[in-house]
Amino acid sequence: MDSHADAPLQNTDDAHAGLAPVIAHLKHIKALTLRTGTDLGAKRTLLNAYFAADARILDTGVTPTLLMVPGGADERLCEVIELPAASEAPAKPRRLLYLHGGSWIAGSPAGHRPLASRLGAAVRSQTYTLDYRLAPEAAFPAGLDDVLSAWRWLCAEFPDDHLLLAGDSAGGNLTLAALNVLKSANERLPDAVIALSPPTDLSWGSASLSRKAEVDPILDPNLLPYVSMAYVQDGTDLGDPRISPLEGDLSGLPPILIQCGEAEILLDDSRRYAAQAQDSGSPVTLSLWPDMPHVFVGFAPLLTAANEALEEAGQFVDMTLVASGTA
């Protein structure tokens, strides 16, 4: 569902079914976020409850296993979720490294299990959700180093399989930042990439930060400098492409699907990245969803638009791999 019009938050069609309770839930989290101030523990509790708008969302029906993989400084845990038995397995195995969101300071594989498991099922892949290190205890580049180490492990362990990379919010930022690093080092790139509502410019220069402030039910533009300062603590230039993926050389990238709601302040981060990558000749698909909030895809099966976005992600991966002649 591609659109470039900015629309008010309202129910307009079947895709909006389930939106009202999602918006109410997010507004409640936003109010508690403001009330708890800079309490890091509270922020982590609230972000772990991000998708808890309805019991159906949390009831994933999956039993993950835990696996240790190499990290930037040591080993890190991954939640491994198998492809559901009822799913049609692809001819060639697929492995998805998933990077959870949480403003670089929060989030966890368990909290993002609803989204990671459903996305893995949609793209017909075994899913590895990485427990990367969080700021402020482990500031940049610790989390990104963990991502790169896990990716390199996946490449070494499964060199003949299709390897996918995806993430939401801060995890989407890490996803796109990792591409910049891997491409610069001439390392293996993912066969397909999915980024959900990624921040791409940590100098926070997108016009939508102010234009969408009144309709975004969860993100407050005034808090963004706080989280970026927690993530990048040593005075590193925010224009570093490992921090702001928009600042990288966006030519020669693998196929990328960016899904973003139009009712979020980070809308133009997705638009700007997609436009710059497309202008650089990279196959980036931008999918914008009217009236949808930040990382709306995680609210399946309650939210109809989320179900449709997951279907779109599955079609994107299938078509990408078929086009490559390796499906």
Image (tube, grey):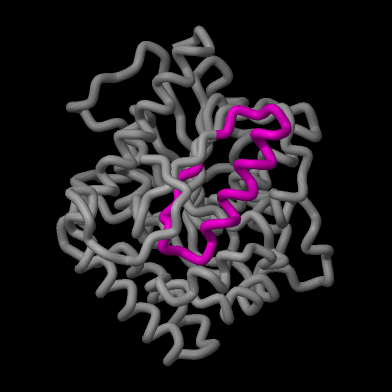
**In this view of the protein, can residue 159 be seen by the observer?**
yes
Image side of residue 10 versus residue 112, left or right = left
Nearer to the camera, 99 or 80: 99
Q: Residue at x 49, y 13 (%)?
A: 323
Q: Position of residue 128 (x, y in %)?
A: 45, 41
On whether residue 109 falls in the magenta region, the answer is no
> On the rendered image, what quadrant is the N terminus found in?
top left
Q: Position of residue 311 (x, y in %)?
A: 30, 34
Image side of residue 273 versus residue 99, left or right = right
> Measured along the vertical axis of the image, is residue 38 above or below residue 136?
below
Q: Position of residue 271 (x, y in %)?
A: 57, 49
> Measured along the vertical axis of the image, is residue 264 above or below residue 188?
below
Q: Residue at x 36, y 11 (%)?
A: 91
Q: Residue at x 39, y 79 (%)?
A: 30
Image side of residue 277 versus residue 131, left or right = right
Over which residues does the magenta segment extend?
258-284
Nearer to the camera, 311 or 82: 311
Asked where in the image residue 2 lies, by quadrant, the reply is top left
Asked where in the image residue 150 lies, by quadrant, the reply is top right
> On the rendered image, what quadrant is the C terminus found in?
top left
Q: Position of residue 178 (x, y in %)?
A: 67, 43
Image side of residue 233 versus residue 119, left or right = right
Nearer to the camera, 300 or 190: 300
Nearer to the camera, 72 or 57: 57
On whether residue 271 falls in the magenta region, the answer is yes
**In this view of the protein, can residue 139 be seen by the observer?**
no
> Measured along the vertical axis of the image, is residue 301 above or below residue 186?
below
Q: Residue at x 64, y 63 (%)?
A: 206
